[in-house]
Image (cartoon, rainbow, N blue to C red):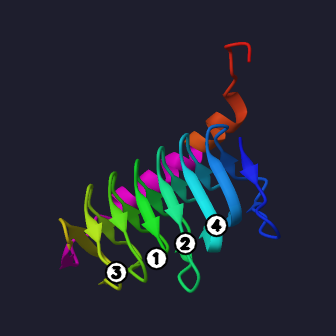
Amino acid sequence: MPIYRLGHRTPTIDPAAYVSPDAVIIGNVTIGAEASIWPGAVLRGDHGTITIGAQTSVQDGTVIHCGPGFPTIVGERCVIGHMVHLEGCILEDDSLVGSGSVVLHHAVVGSWSIVGANAVVPNRTQIPPDSMALGVPVTIKEGATNRPLIQHSAEQYVLNARLFRDELVRIDGV
């Protein structure tokens, strides 16, 4: 897996995390215990910081970036779907961002909230805890979340990361 130091900015990856051999980690990125970073994900901490909490999954093709004055902070037990773009935002613990979604600068996704697939969360949007955010731009429905879905998804990705860490073997001879 390509993991790069950029000048003095060096990634910190917990030994219990799983990072796919096909993910790219650059610069000021911190990845917590039992977190998982899947194939094609790019986490680029060049002019700011990226923090991925314990037991959070960053799924295939996701791009996470940050900037000066707008770090990207992803809490614990979060589920980040396939092909998501996170840019200078905060995802509180136990939140889920559906596949193809975009969450932009200074937005905050509250705990136990769900950002639906292909949604766009504009700059500075605040999604309260236990909400569902759907559409482009998002419409927020407070109290409409699905806590069991978020919890089950996070737990399954922790188990899947263990499977991949223990059993993934490249077989093409390279």
Q: Which residue is mark 1?
A: 89
> Residue at horizontal 81%, vertical 66%?
7
Contact between marks 3 and 2 (CB within 8 A): the answer is no
Q: Is residue 60 visible?
A: yes
In front: mark 4 or mark 1? 4
Select label 1 or label 3 by which is in front.
Answer: 3
Provide the residue span drawn in magenta: 139-159
- In whole angstroms, how far apart are the C-alphas of marks 3 and 4? 19 Å
Task: Please identify the quadrant where the N terminus is shown.
Answer: top right
Name which residue lies at 59% across and 82% down. 68
**Is residue 22 toward the left or the right of residue 74 in the image?**
right
Please name the amino acid that badge 4 sits on: Gly
Q: Which mark is residue 66?
A: 2
- Is residue 57 found left or right of 81 in the rendered image? right
Looking at the image, is mark 4 or mark 1 earlier in the sequence?
4
Q: CA distance from mark 2 to mark 1?
A: 8 Å
Task: Tell me if label 3 and label 4 are in contact, CB under 8 Å.
Answer: no
Marks 2 and 4, how far apart at CA:
6 Å
